[in-house]
Amino acid sequence: MPPVLTADSHDSVVTVDPSVSMAVESLAADLLPFADGRIDDPAWIRQAGRRCHDLPAALRRSLAAFGRDSGPAGALLLRGLPVDEELIGPTPMVSGSVRAEATMPAAVLMLLTHALGQPISFRPEKSGAMVHDVVPVPGSEEFQGNEGSALLTFHNENAFHPHRPDFVLLLCVRADHDRVAGLRTASIRQVHHLLDATHRETLFRPEFTTAPPPSFALPAAQSQPHPVLSGAPDDPDLLVDFAATEPLTERAAQAMLELQHLFAAHALTHHLLPGDLAVVDNRVTVHGRTGFAPRYDGRDRWLHRTFATQNLRRSRVHRAGDGHILTG
């Protein structure tokens, strides 16, 4: 009997066997009509959480292992998930686009999000929708966020927020025309030992502030001073957005510059195809994207995005009714 999950040349890339893909598709199909297909309905979200336990055991184990230890790259790529590009309609071209009604790829993504933790969203971003569209929008080419198409700089997702997600999930439902848009990831685990000792020490100091990304409908404001690295000296957590983090001292600026150069030199790049799911450990890994040229013809690159946290209780004060949406 063939294996249901096959590791590719890099152990952070895993191909899903067709039998596993079919089982996932069947579970997702059962979810589609629940709660009238309202994917943000708390009842729909709870049902997805229950049904995630019915995912094939090998897939659940792979995601659970990644959630416990995301490895040197801090990123996982699952290939071969059920996405039928011909059934999803034209790529949206409007700012703030989300999936309000359950579709096959959105349901698949929510099932796998539950396998890593609890799904969360943020009210100031895309009105708190659970599943975001990541699509190029006319006039937003230089936008440093999910609707741009120019080079997207490395960042931890929602780095300014005290309850930023632990994992970012990106499911490709349509690739860009020219197949040049590359998801780039870089982990502090890949470069920590290469940092100059003085710069490493500086990155552990609270000499940086971070503003909300432009996708958040919030006033321009900086976070409280914070370090870029924290936690265990030999395996630190990472907190930086190279488009929004500001160093407060000259030594902080130099340390941040070296870190940026190291990330650029050691980044992994994946050109996502329909059915590819990238999972980024937002605690230790930054992500970005190479630039590409959208055509705005309804066939441009289209990803679905969700966020997961392993400790939902920690943000309880920010979630009305113990729901999944953080109010601020």
Image (tube, rainbow, N blue to C red):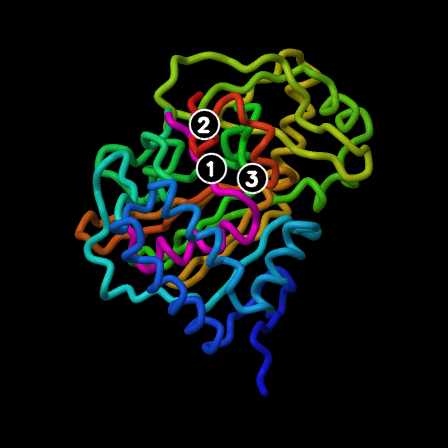
Q: Are marks 1 and 3 in contact (CB under 8 Å)?
A: yes
List x then y, in percent, for residue 239. Answer: 62, 29
Residue located 44% across and 61% down the image: 276
Q: SS for tag 1?
A: strand
View extreme (left): residue: 297
**Mark linked to residue 40:** none
View extreme (bottom): residue: 1
* Quadrant where the image shows the N terminus: bottom right
**Mark linked to residue 120:** 1
Spatial CA distance of label 2 from label 1 is: 7 Å
Q: SS for tag 3?
A: strand
For the residue marked with disc 3, what is the amino acid? Thr
**Mark linked to residue 309:** 3
Name the residue that disc number 2 marks. 326
Q: State which region is magenta.
A: 102-123
List x then y, in percent, for residue 182. Answer: 45, 52
Residue located 28% across and 33% down the image: 140
Q: Is residue 73 magenta?
A: no
Question: For this rendering, which residue is in front, 73 or 5?
Answer: 5
Q: Quadrant of residue 128?
A: top left
Is 153 on the left or on the right of 311, as rendered?
left
Q: Are marks 2 and 1 in contact (CB under 8 Å)?
A: yes
* Quadrant where the image shows the C terminus: top left
First of labels 2, 1 by sequence position:
1
